[in-house]
Amino acid sequence: MKNFCWWQFCITNVKHRAMNIDRMEFISWMERIIERFDLLSAHISELEKKRGSVDGEELLDNQDILQMLKISGRSLQRYRSIGKLPYYTISGKIYYKLSDVHQFIRESINVRTPKNYARE
């Protein structure tokens, strides 16, 4: 007598049951799955729109800025304090407009030209 193996029985049973699913049942399951994907897609799109925007412009929080600029929290606080980086407080949380961050980056870049080297 063969040794009985529970997991092999389960696999065989699942394979047998899977083969017995008729075409209409399969189509029905696929339609349900597609409906769920559509619902999830709509929900994700809605969340992306709500993520943070003012006047159609994306808002970034402190963590986003720290990762983007690779600076410390203290440096970010200093840029806010001296007015180099405009910010907005919403419900006690600080946000930055993406366009303001881009402007800050453009203003912070030191372009070195041969004339600059001659002065040093």
Image: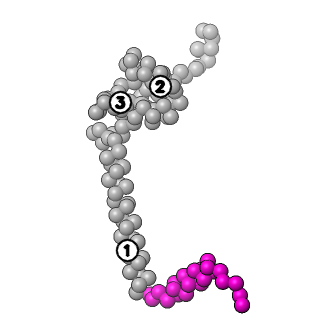
Q: Which residue is mark 3?
A: 94
What is the spatial separation of the Cα atoms under label 1 and label 2, in whole angstroms? 47 Å
User: Which quarter of the image is occupied by the N terminus?
Assistant: bottom right
Q: Among all residues in the image, which is located at the extreme right?
A: 1
- The amino acid type of the residue labelled 1 equals Arg
Picture quadrant where residue 111 is located: top right
Q: Residue at x 34, y 64 (%)?
A: 39
User: Does 83 sit left or right of 110 as displayed?
Assistant: left
Q: Which residue is mark 2?
A: 73
- The vertical placement of 112 against 118, above or below, is below
User: Which quarter of the image is occupied by the C terminus?
Assistant: top right
Q: Which residue is mark 1?
A: 32
Is 70 within the magenta?
A: no
Marks 2 and 3, the one that precedes in the sequence: 2
- Of 5 and 36, the residue lying toward us: 5
Picture quadrant where residue 56 is located: top left
- Of 59 and 116, the residue lying toward us: 59
The magenta-colored residue range is 1-23
What is the spatial separation of the Cα atoms under label 1 and label 3, in whole angstroms? 42 Å
- The amino acid type of the residue labelled 3 equals Ile
Residue 98 visible? The answer is: no
Q: Residue at x 49, y 34 (%)?
A: 68
Provide the secondary structure element on which disc 1 rests. helix
For mark 1, does the 10 Å Cα neighbourhood hold few (<14), some (14 to 19), or many (20 or more) residues?
A: few
